[in-house]
Image (tube, rainbow, N blue to C red):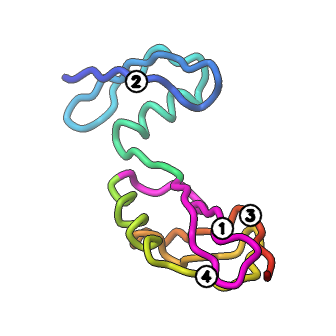
Amino acid sequence: MEKRELICICCPLGCQMAVTIKDGKVIETVGNTCNRGKIYGEKEIINPTRIVTSTVKVDGGEKPYVSVKTKEDIPKSKIFECMKGLQNLTVKAPIYIGDIILDNAGETGIPIIATSNVLVK
């Protein structure tokens, strides 16, 4: 049996939690004050995921970059692959919030979307 300690990030309380694992399965979660914390603790230990945020170059825009993020959380192990796909990407203005910038972030099937507007210069 293994016990891992972590701090929940689901809300501002920041509960200090302990998750006990046996044979790759969560058998106990303690310290959380709500069910969201329990779900977070189990997910963080078994399959950690993250929302990735970044910027992408814009051609012909009023701003040189547009802020972007993954539409959903992706496996933590795919973050560098996701960022590599954005590294040399340039999009053409205009860009609007919610526009898909990249269809498949890091081979996860999850798109990268714009989180700000960039109008034509």
Which range of residues does the magenta coloring cover? 52-76
Which badge, 1 or 4, is on the more N-terminal residue?
1
Q: Which residue is tagged 4?
A: 91
The CA span between labels 1 and 2 is 33 Å
C-beta proximity under 8 Å, tags 1 and 3: yes
Image quarter of residue 106: bottom left
**Residue visible at 57% across and 70% down?**
56
Q: Which mark is residue 116?
A: 3
The CA span between labels 1 and 4 is 9 Å
In the shown orientation, is residue 115 left or right of residue 52? right
C-beta proximity under 8 Å, tags 1 and 4: yes
Of badges 2 and 4, nearer the viewer stands 4
Of badges 1 and 2, nearer the viewer stands 1
Residue 53 location (% of width, % of height)? 55, 56
Name the kind of residue labelled 3 in the image.
Ser
C-beta proximity under 8 Å, tags 2 and 3: no
Which badge, 1 or 2, is on the more N-terminal residue?
2
**Residue visible at 57% across and 58% down?**
72
Which badge, 2 or 4, is on the more N-terminal residue?
2
Q: Which residue is tagged 1?
A: 66
**Residue visible at 70% across and 62% down?**
115
SS category of the residue bearing label 1: strand
Please rate how many residues cluster around mark 1, counting C-alpha atoms within 10 Å: few if below 14, some from 14 to 19, many from 20.
Answer: many
Image quarter of residue 54: bottom right
Residue 31 in the image: above or below residue 39: above
Q: Which residue is tagged 2?
A: 6
The CA span between labels 2 and 4 is 39 Å
In the shown orientation, is residue 63 left or right of residue 18? right
Residue 28 in the image: above or below residue 62: above
Which badge, 4 or 3, is on the more N-terminal residue?
4
